Amino acid sequence: MHIHFSVYGHSFGQRLITQLYFEGDPLIARCPIAATIRNRSQLDTLVAPLDLNNSRPHDFLAYKFDIVLRGRRQTMFENKLEGM
């Protein structure tokens, strides 16, 4: 399972599209979108780690996902090569 994000902002001139995967999801390896990302470190930027400090037993699991626009920890965007 994954969730798509569409990001707009004042500092870039286009819509950026990415997705979030959940740590431990065995279906990541079977996802055709994830399979297009050949660099494992780029794929890792799309996987939200489980946040046990904010999870509640018998209630819900929490995950942490930061969208990073620039720099070493930049999130992989589907359409980044189109004008960025």
Image (cartoon, rainbow, N blue to C red):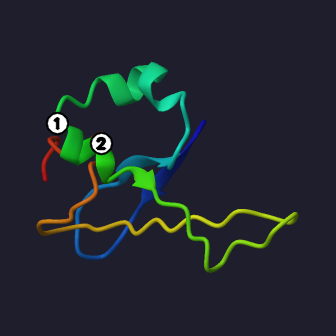
Residue 68, percent across and down? Answer: 29, 68
Residue 25 tag number: none
The total of numbered circles placed on residues is 2
Q: Amino acid at mark 2?
A: Leu
Instruction: Say which quarter of the image contains residue 39.
Output: top left
Q: Nearer the viewer, residue 2 or 53?
A: 53
The CA span between labels 1 and 2 is 7 Å
Instruction: Say which quarter of the image contains residue 67.
Output: bottom left
Q: Residue furthest bottom?
A: 53
Q: Is residue 11 left or right of residue 58?
A: left
Q: Amino acid at mark 1?
A: Asn
Q: Is residue 21 above or below residue 45?
A: above
- Within 10 Å of the Cα at label 2, are there few (<14), some (14-19), or many (20+) other Cα atoms? some
* Residue sitting at x 12%, y 66%: 72
Q: Secondary structure at mark 2?
A: helix
Q: Which residue is mark 2?
A: 43
Q: Nearer the viewer, residue 77 or 54?
A: 54
Q: Is residue 82 above or below residue 12?
A: above
Residue 50, percent across and down? Answer: 55, 62
Q: Which residue is mark 1?
A: 39
Q: Secondary structure at mark 1?
A: loop
Residue 54, percent across and down? Answer: 65, 78
* Residue sitting at x 50%, y 49%: 23
Q: Nearer the viewer, residue 83 or 60?
A: 60
Q: Is residue 42 left or right of residue 6?
A: left
Task: Name the quadrant of the N terminus.
Answer: top right
- Within 10 Å of the Cα at label 1, are there few (<14), some (14-19), or many (20+) other Cα atoms? few
* Residue sitting at x 54%, y 27%: 27
* Residue sitting at x 61%, y 80%: 53
Residue 83, percent across and down? Answer: 13, 48
CB contact under 8 Å: marks 1 and 2: yes
